[in-house]
Image (cartoon, rainbow, N blue to C red):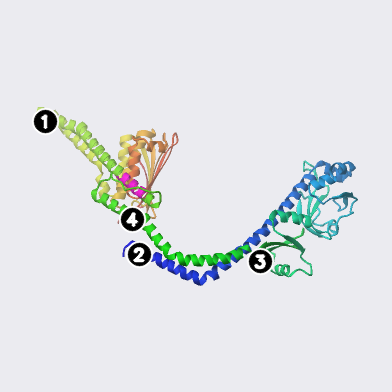
Amino acid sequence: MNLRWTILGVILLTFVGLVLILSISLQGILVPHFREEENRSALLNVQRVLGLLENERAALTDAVHNWSSRDESYDFIRNGSPDYIQRNLSDSVMLGLNIDLMVFVSPEGGIVHAQIAGGQANPGIDIPAGLRERIQPGDALLRTIDEREPRSGLVATDRGPLLVVSAPLLSSSGESPSAGTLIIGRYLDDRQLNRISAIVRLPLTLLPYTQPDLPAEFAEAKLAITAEDPITAVSTSETQMAGYALLNDFYGVPVYILQVEQGRTLYRNSQLVLLYLTITIVMGALLFSVMTFLALDRLVLARIRKLGNEVTRIGSGGDLSARVTVDRRDELTLVSNQINGMLANLQALSHRLVEIQEAERRKIALELHDEIGQLLTGLKLQLDTGAENGAAQTKTRALADDLIQKVRNLSLDLRPTMLDDLGLLPALLWHFDRFTSLTGVKVNFSQSGLPDNRFSPEIETTTYRVIQEALTNVARHSGVGEASVQVLHRDGVLSIQVEDRGGGFVAETEFTNNRTRGLRGMRERVALVGGSITIDSVPGWGTSILVELPAKAQPVEGSGNDHSVTGG
């Protein structure tokens, strides 16, 4: 069965199963979900109201902080100047700040002055019961001489809930000790609750927690509310539900229950939604299956077939300049672009391999022409002109020896035979000695895991060539007389690090330069064996090249121990 019919069968079976599952479990899944959403909506409405109450508390805190940190207030509680009351405690000021009362308390707990909205009062007069009994030494409502921050909370009074904020009276500099406590309060009476109710557009009710004759819904909420979960929702009827919150007083004791009512429109709408979903899913399952299959066939399957045919054609033709068709903008477009990118990289790599091959041929030709050709020419002349001359024979022999050495060096530069015969470590040690003798640059070499193991020819060749090219760059460009090479084999990874303290360069700039074939050649060699290369170079500070190659070790017999070598 091909992919087209498989997908069609899967789509049909999926929608048939979906219809059956929904027909059986629609009521058992969606109805609880809608009820949960309804409860969540009720809890969110309660949190909105609590947020507004928190704003009320924050506004009072800002007000008390402004009053308690003024030098005038600080002097007033100490000296009792009447001018302060006339200037600062007028009815217009308190009404403007929406403050119902203000009490100045001495450090000993005595009431210095009490101001009630609507008229000034003598100390202790018109202070509601419930608040007055709290104003005494040692009560948490009063700030101690060492406290600096205000505190706030509810206080149950005979006139209803009172939101109070108490703060220490301090000088504006904050350096002097507290001169007493300033208490301001705002009643959460019907007027305030109606104002908050108008903001949230929901009815609010606030009842005492300890009221003996609580309504049934309040009593149910009281049983459901706990210290860990102070908010709950209760359905009061088929059309109404309410959220409830427990409000603690200034001392953390439950004191009031807040009710926020709302209509059950979500529940009623859910019944209509369930009916609509059932009919729609049953009637539309077949149509949707056909449309889905046709869309998949046109947008995905047909394009996959086309992409596969184009890849096959390019692979069989061998034309790396050909590209697959790119249309639309989706995941298949991304795949097409990636295939085209891969083809472009293969084409560039092919050109690069040709360039490298031609460069090597050019190098060998120049060596043969300039070095070996001249030696052969000289050798021929010596043989032609001085066959019987002993001095000529000596010179001819010297030329032959020089020619043999040149050929040997050329062969070693192309590929040292000891890399195949003896392994990576002997080839590296030989190369370091030869490199130092030719360039005068000393190589500090350390290794771990090389004497005990051999690696695949590709890994050993890549390691040798990377180190060879890196040291060649050190000799040509760094301007230093010393470099360090470290080769470590651990956990299936062969790590190579070549460092110098020379002139350095900007790696990003160098890679965009067509002349930096050595660095790009290293990167290509490393990529071909699945490794990674990191080049860290700072102009004036030196260069560090770190290469990590996946290397499966092949232990050899008679291996030595780890050691370090310094080339000289």
Q: Are marks 2 and 1 in contact (CB under 8 Å)?
A: no
For the residues carrying marks 2 and 3, which lies nearer the camera in this image?
3
Q: Which residues are magenta?
A: 336-346
Task: Please state the horizontal and vertical placement of residue 242, each as a whole percent of the image.
Answer: 68, 64
For the residues carrying marks 3 and 1, which lies nearer the camera in this image?
3
Instruction: Tell me which numbered mark, 2 or 3, is placed earlier along the sequence.
Output: 2
The residue carrying mark 4 is 302
Residue 341 lies within the magenta run:
yes
**Residues packed near mark 3 inside 10 Å, few (<14), some (14 to 19) or many (20 plus):** few
- Foreground: 133 or 500? 133
The residue carrying mark 3 is 239
Q: CA distance from mark 2 to mark 1?
A: 84 Å
Residue 473 found in image quarter: top left
Residue kind at label 1, given as amino acid type: Leu
Task: Please state the horizontal and vertical placement of residue 444, each as a whole percent of the image.
Answer: 38, 42
Is 518 displayed left or right of 184 in the figure? left
Residue kind at label 3, given as amino acid type: Thr
The residue carrying mark 1 is 383
Q: CA distance from mark 2 to mark 4?
A: 15 Å
What element does badge 2 sit on? helix
Instruction: Tell me which numbered mark, 3 or 1, is placed earlier along the sequence.
Output: 3
Instruction: Tell me which numbered mark, 2 or 1, is placed earlier along the sequence.
Output: 2
Name, please, the residue furthest toward the bottom. Answer: 24
Q: CA distance from mark 3 to mark 1?
A: 122 Å
The residue carrying mark 2 is 6
Residue 207 found in image quarter: bottom right
Q: Which mark is residue 437?
A: none
- Foreground: 110 or 405? 110
**Residues packed near mark 1 inside 10 Å, few (<14), some (14 to 19) or many (20 plus):** some
Q: CA distance from mark 4 to mark 1?
A: 77 Å
Position of the N terminus by quadrant:
bottom left
As drawn, 93 above or below 154: above
